[in-house]
Amino acid sequence: MAKDPVPRRTLTLRDVSEASGVSEMTVSRVLRSRGDVSVSTRERVLEAARALGYVPNKIAGALASQRVNLVAVIIPSLSNMVFPEVMTGISDVLEDTGLQPVVGVTNYSPEREEKVLYEMLSWRPSGVIIAGLEHTPAARAMLQNAGIPIVEVMDIDGTPVDSAVGISHFRAGRHMAAAIVAAGYRRIGFLGTMMPHDHRARKRLEGFEEELAKSGLEVQDREFYSGGSQLLKGREMTEAILTRSPDLDFLYYSNDMIAAGGLLYCLHHGIDVPGKLGLAGFNGVELLEGLPCRLATMDACRHEIGRRAAEIIAGQHEAGATGGIITELEPKLQPGDTIRST
Amino acid sequence: MAKDPVPRRTLTLRDVSEASGVSEMTVSRVLRSRGDVSVSTRERVLEAARALGYVPNKIAGALASQRVNLVAVIIPSLSNMVFPEVMTGISDVLEDTGLQPVVGVTNYSPEREEKVLYEMLSWRPSGVIIAGLEHTPAARAMLQNAGIPIVEVMDIDGTPVDSAVGISHFRAGRHMAAAIVAAGYRRIGFLGTMMPHDHRARKRLEGFEEELAKSGLEVQDREFYSGGSQLLKGREMTEAILTRSPDLDFLYYSNDMIAAGGLLYCLHHGIDVPGKLGLAGFNGVELLEGLPCRLATMDACRHEIGRRAAEIIAGQHEAGATGGIITELEPKLQPGDTIRST
DNA sequence: AGGGTGGCCGTTACCGCTAACATAGCGCGA
DNA sequence: TCGCGCTATGTTAGCGGTAACGGCCACCCT
C-alpha cells in the first residue's frame, strides 16, 4: 500500500533484459511473439517482465517499426445513440485484427473536424473512418495525402476521398415521402434540427421534398430546434406545429428521438394515430421498441456500416492498398403503427 | 483525382527544413512555437509546411520529449448515455489544456478492463480517468506503477489508487429508500440489471436494502434483465413483476431507462401513479424530461464528475504530483411526480 | 569428415523528433 | 576596444524500441 519511496523511472526493455539475462532484442521478440525464441528463455523473459510489471512502450515501438495499430474514427457526436452503434460495429470487427479504434468528436463543426483530424493523423494511424463526405478543403487534402485507407461513412451521396460505406439519405427521404403519399396523406409537416452542418438530415429533406413535388405536394409547415432533450423538444415542437397548422395530417421528423417525443404527445392528447395524423422518424433506434406503439422509421444500418468500414480498413491494412471501395447499403422502411396501411 | 504516381514516403521535418532553408530544429521550434525564432523565418517555415501539407509526427515527438498529451479514459460502455455525459465534462475541461482524451471501453468486463488499460498505458498517457474502484489486482498494480495521475470516477465507496471523484452509491440507495418509506410505501419491488460487475448498481441496492431494514422492511420481489432495449425491458419487467406480485406499491429501478419503460407501462395500463404505485429510477437522464410525467430519480452528477476528474489530471499535469484528492459529490433527489408527496 | 541447414540469439543502425548545449552575430556600456 | 548579454540558429546525442543481418552451434545427411 505504501507509496514507493523512489519514484523510479519507468521500465524499459533493458530492465527486463537485465533481469532475465538476455539481450533487449530477445525480450522484444518474446513480448511480440515474433521470431524464434526457445521455450526456456521465453518463459524466463515473461516471468521477469511480469515480476517487474513491465508495460511496453508503443511509442518507441511504433516509431521503430513504422507501424501503428490505431484506426482513427471521427464522428460528430456521441450523445445521440447513432454513432455509438457505428462504433460497436467497428469494434466488433477490429476486435481480432490487432487494430484499435480511437475516437474523435467534432460536434458537427467543420473546423473542429479539421483540427481533430490533424491531431489524429499526427499519430500516424493505420486508417481513418470519418463520418460524412463533406469536409473542409484542408481536411480533404490531409485525407488524400495521408497515404492510408480512408473510409467515409454514413452517407454516399457525393464523391468520397477513397472508400465509402453508407446509405443514400437523399433516396431515403424520397422513399419515405413515397410511402407517405401512397398511404394517402397530403398535408405534411416537417420537424428537424437547426444544424447547418448536418448534411445527412438536409439530404433526406431534399429527397423528401423532391418526391412530394412529383405528386404536386409540398411541405406545408416546418419546425426546427436546437439543443436540449430531444424527446422533450419533439413534444414541444409537435405541440407548436399542430397549434399553428392544425390541419396537418402527417409529421415527418428528422430523427427518431424527436419523433418519439411527438408520438408521446399525440398519445397523451388522444390524437388518432395513424388515422387522423401519421408520424415517421428516421434511424431505427432501439429506444423505439419500448414505446407504446411502433413508430414508422427507416433503419440507417448503423451497425452494418461500422462493420463494413472496419472490414475495409482491416482488409487494406493486411492486403496493401486497393482503394476506392464504395458500399451502398439499403435502408429498410419500417412502417410500424404510425402510418396508415394502404 | 488520380492517385499520385509516386506514393511518396510521408513527410518529415527534414522535408520542411529543406524547403525553407533552415535547420530541422528551427522548424521544430516554429511548429511548436517554442523558443525564439525571428518573424521572417517563422513565416517562411509555416508557409513551407502548409505548402507541403506537413503533419507532425507525434510519435517521434513524444518519444523524444517524453511527453504525451493524451489522457486515457476507461469506461464500461458508451451506449447508456451516462458515460457520454461524463466524457462531455472531461472534454470541456481538457479542451484548453493541450490534453486530449482517448476513450477505452470495457463492457463491464474486468478482463477487458485490464487489457484496455494495458493497451492504453503502453502509449504512456499523461493521466488515467477510469470508472469505478474495483479492478483486477493486475490492473491496480499497473495503475499504481504508472507514475501518472490516476482518477477513479463515479464511485467513492472504497479505497482509490490515487484520486477519486464520484458519489456514494451506497448512500444514494439509502437516501432513496428513506424517501420512499417516508412517503408511506411499504411493499417494495426492485428491478435491475443482471450484471455482476456493475458494482455501483449493487452498492445502491445494498444501501437501499439496509435503509429499508431500519424500518423493518425488505424488498418483496425482484426482477433482473440483461441485454436488449432498456426501455422495452423496463416495460416487460414491470409487467412481469406486477403479475407475480400484484400487491407491490413501489418499484425501484436500477436505472432511469428501465424506469421510464415501467412508467410508460403504468400510464398505458391506467395504473394510478403515484397513488397506488410509486416509481423511482436512478441517474437523472435528460431523456426523462420528455416523458409525460416526471419520474423520481437521483442525479448522478455525471457532467460534474467528468469536469472534476479532468481538472485533477490537468492540475497535476502542470503542477507535479500531489496525489490522493478525493472529491465526493452529493446526488440530488428529484422527487418528480411518481412518488407521493408526504 | 565436410558442409549444409535451421534454431536461437546478439549487434548495428536507424525511426523522426526534441533537450541541451554550442555557436555566431549584434548592440552597447565602460 | 573589449567583453558581456542577448537573440537567432545550428549541432549532437539520445528517447525506447525494431528491422535486418550475421554468427554460433548442434544436428543430420551423404
Image: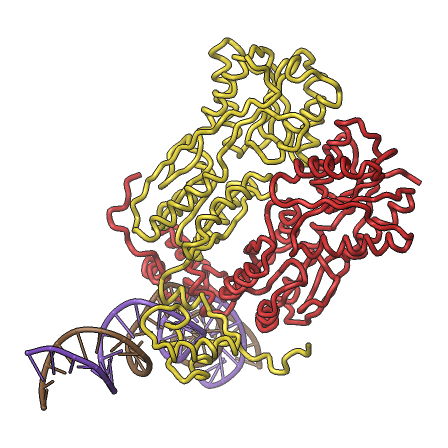
Chain colours: A red, B yellow, C purple, D brown
| Residue A89 vs residue C29, the one in the foreground | C29
On-image quarter of the C terminus of chain B? top right
In the displayed orientation, state which residue is furthest to the front: A244
Left or right: residue B216 versus residue C10 is right
Instruction: Give the total of numbered labels.
Output: 0
Left or right: residue B106 versus residue B292 is left
- The residue positioned 25% from the left and 50% from the top of the image is A6
Q: Position of residue A125 (x, y in %)?
A: 54, 64
Residue A271 found in image quarter: top right
On-image quarter of the N terminus of chain B? bottom right
In the displayed orientation, state which residue is furthest to the right: A342
| Residue A244 vs residue B247, the one in the foreground | A244
Q: Position of residue B273 (x, y in %)?
A: 66, 17
Where B62 falls versus B53 (above or below)? above
Left or right: residue B145 versus residue B265 is left
Residue B261 found in image quarter: top right
Residue A51 visible in rendering: no
Q: Position of residue A293 (x, y in %)?
A: 79, 32
Left or right: residue B38 versus residue A35 is left
| Residue B190 vs residue A25, the one in the foreground | B190
Where D26 falls versus A257 (above or below)? below
Q: Position of residue B168 (x, y in %)?
A: 44, 29
- The residue positioned 62% from the left and 26% from the top of the image is B294
Residue B288 found in image quarter: top right
In the displayed orientation, state which residue is furthest to the top: B216
Residue B328 visible in rendering: yes
